[in-house]
């Protein structure tokens, strides 16, 4: 049984890429509009909604665009 373990031999070395470093938790999302009225308007334009699209439940729960 000269070649009995031929399927388990690896040829060469495999180099795995290092996973990316996690994002810094203090980095602000560029689309975050919580303190920026201009960004809020830009986001609304991009989504095709107006300032009146929030329902009462959304305003009470501070839940963004989820009803």
Image (spheres, helix red, strand yellow):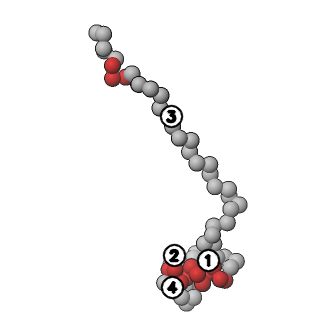
Gap in angstroms between the C-alphas marked 2 and 1 = 9 Å
The answer, for residue 58, to whether it is visible in the render is: no
Viewer-nearest of discs 4 and 1: 4
Q: 60 or 29: which is nearer to us?
A: 29
CB under 8 Å between discs 2 and 1 = no
Tag 4 residue: 49
Say few, some or many: other residues with alpha carbon within 10 Å of mark 4 (under 14 / 14 to 19 / 20 or more). Answer: few
Query: Which label's residue is closer to the chain start, 3 or 2?
Result: 3
Gap in angstroms between the C-alphas marked 2 and 4 = 13 Å
Q: Residue at x 60, y 84 (%)?
A: 41
Query: Which label's residue is closer to the chain start, 2 or 4?
Result: 4
Q: Secondary structure at mark 4?
A: loop
- Mark number, residue 15: 3
Q: Secondary structure at mark 3?
A: loop
Query: Which label's residue is closer to the chain start, 3 or 4?
Result: 3
Gap in angstroms between the C-alphas marked 3 and 1 = 46 Å
CB under 8 Å between discs 3 and 2 = no
Query: Which label's residue is closer to the chain start, 4 or 1?
Result: 4
């Amino acid at each position: 049984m000269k070649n009995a373990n031929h399927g388990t031999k690896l040829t060469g070395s495999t180099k795995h890429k290092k996973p990316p470093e996690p994002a810094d938790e203090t980095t602000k999302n560029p689309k975050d509009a919580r303190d920026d009225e201009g960004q809020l308007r830009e986001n609304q334009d991009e989504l095709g909604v107006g300032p009146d699209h929030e329902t009462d439940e959304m305003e009470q729960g501070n839940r963004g665009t989820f009803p």
